[in-house]
Image (tube, rainbow, N blue to C red):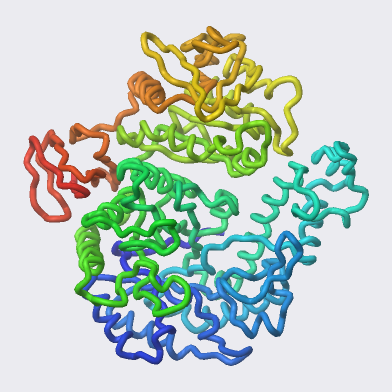
Amino acid sequence: MTEPKLAISELLHGGDYNPDQWLDYPGVIDQDFKLMKTAQANTVTVGVFSWGSLEPSEGQYNFGWLDNIFDRVEVQHGHVILATPSGAKPRWLAEKYPEVLRTDEFGHKLLYGGRHNHCFTSPVYREKVQQINRLLAERYGQRESLILWHISNELGGECHCELCQAAFRQWLQHKYQTLAALNAAWWTTFWGHQITSWEQVHSPSPLGDTNLKGLNIDWRRFVTDQTIDYFEDEVQPLRELTSNIPITTNFMTDTADMIPFHGLDYRKFAEHLDVISWDSYPAWANDYETTAELGMKVALINDYYRSLKQQNFLIMESSPSRVNWHPDNRAKRPGMHQLASLQNIAGGSDSMLYFQWRQSRGASEMFHGSVIEHRGGDQTRTFKEVAEVGQDLANLQEIIGSQPVKAKVAIIFDFDNMCALDDAEAYSQTTKKYWQTIQQQYTYFWRHDIPVDVISPADKLDDYQVVIDPMHFMMATEFADKLAAYVKNGGHLVGTYISGVVNESALAHLNNAPQSFETVYGIQPIETDVMYPSQRNTIVWGDKKYQVYDYAERIERTTAQELACYQSDFYQNSSAITINQFGTGQAYYLACRTEQKFLNQFYDYLAHLLDLFPDKSIVKNSADISIQIRQKDQTQYIFVMNFSDQKKNIELVEALPNILTGKIISAGNYELEPYSVLVLRK
């Protein structure tokens, strides 16, 4: 099936709008649309949690208020992203059909409340969702303002009811065919846990089994597959009736460390979407990292979501000021909202949308930062900064159709590996930090403005000069073969400690890692030293010493050459960093977790060796400045961003126009204000 494309002629600005909260306050809605024009908001996402307003009782519908919103948007020549309302079911549905309520891992049927408290397997729930979605498609599918379907909201969670248990058993039977194969994959003979009937299988539960690694990883895979199966059911009427309108759902990120959502395999899910969108809520102005460090984390997440389909994405939700669920909910500093917004655009977003347009007066998220707050209207700092971003996006309309420049570097991120590593014993439960390790590997490239893709083991490798594959604990033999073929054909591979330990069933590879893994790296992993937080080792590379912490792997070299060795402990003088020539390529193995200073030096060596640096018209004197480029045909749009609360200098090699102001910036030195952004056309 050909995916319908999101056809837009302008960058999208606006966001979630919940006018059904304000039906008794028509003056509020009038003011909202007036202020949307002031802020140059051209897009509203409506209907996200509106099932109870659209169908207040079973079979009784009220579409009048939504008709009115469509009419108002079209008068202002705006766009509508119409959400299906399944993220929060109405109370009548739970009361009449209690099977739609979720069951937790303890077997408790949950009460009505919250959101996403519904069973994805329930036939009743699927039927009711299709009914309301079909009505929405019939009524609004041909409206000129409709540009995108937004399915549910932040899909996630799991249900352990009997319907889901039956679906899980069916999923396992399809995968393994026989109980013998299941028992072999799960290694059930240990502790005498052999399964002799499919009916004995139960999802992981603290009341039962959480020790079978194969069960745990298969349950995680099932949850993704079952969520996707539900999703396909939900979108069936939309695909049928509005095949020209693309479909998305908003993906999530753990905001504390900017880590992809652990609940679903988004790589699989992306195949079922026409457009990727995600909800961006970084902890701006926090006290535990610099703005530049946080900017790096956001850039990596943008690269991850862009790489899912190798196309531009949407920021579906963000806050123009603060949120309401961080441990500390600090507002952005003046200028940060423009910086954050244009960073997302630079990274490949074609939108800057907010949750939500107007703060809720009560209930959940009533103090979540919104464009219109409870007090101040259009006189707040937040509103004025949103209006400034609206003007910026209006000035940037010519970049529509441009994309971030093609990456020469890729980092492997494997959802199954993350789940398996999270579940693994023997290492430290506090320092495994798979995604944080990816962040560390990414940091050098961000600081030096070298584009990076974040790809999965299923993706092609041959398009990249460098592939970085950190902490690949769960590695299928087929993927090890794929890495070897990549290097043999001229690629440059970087692997790390705690890789090639278990197979795709979470069973340990016997004797050694997969043969092709050992061949391509030219080493054999022997032992992993797990350090306490205060413990350190040291490696020497050239004439410099670098600290090692958390993990130090002892390896034996077969064909690899040593680049660095350990300086202490029982593995003193043994190899810590190696290089192996394999075919026409090279494979580097980092057997330990090092301080960032080493990674910076190592990747600087590799970047110069392979000439990875982009051609620039700008010279910067600080890593707090990030330069990202979007390109269309022969035109580059160069985003120069100061992630610092201090002024920073850059040097322009040639005079270039700043699209945000329409003014030419002369060649030579230029001073960037704190948190400021230039967008230059070349």
Q: Residue at x 38, y 47 (%)?
A: 298
Q: Which of the two residues, 409 or 169, is positioned nearer the viewer here? A: 169
Name the image quarter holding the C terminus. Answer: top left
Q: Residue at x 16, y 53 (%)?
A: 659
Residue at the extreme front: 534
Whether residue 63 is visible, yes or no, is: yes
Q: Which of the two residues, 598 or 538, is positioned nearer the viewer here? A: 538
Whole-percent x, y for residue 351 in the image: 34, 60
**The quadrant where residue 14 appears:** bottom left
Whether residue 679 is visible, yes or no, is: no
Name the image quarter holding the N terminus. Answer: bottom right
Q: Which of the two residues, 78 or 362, is positioned nearer the viewer here? A: 362
Q: Is residue 646 above or below residue 350?
A: above
Whole-percent x, y for residue 221 in the image: 68, 50
Total marks drawn?
A: 0
**The quadrant where residue 327 appears:** bottom left
**The quadrant where residue 336 appears:** bottom left
Left or right: where does residue 630 sit relative to residue 65?
A: left
Whole-percent x, y for residue 70 in the image: 38, 82
Q: Is residue 317 above or below residue 412?
A: below
Q: Is residue 53 above or below residue 339?
A: below
Q: Residue at x 65, y 40 (%)?
A: 420
Q: Is residue 147 above or below residue 568?
A: below
Whole-percent x, y for residue 169 in the image: 81, 56
Q: Residue at x 29, y 57 (%)?
A: 332
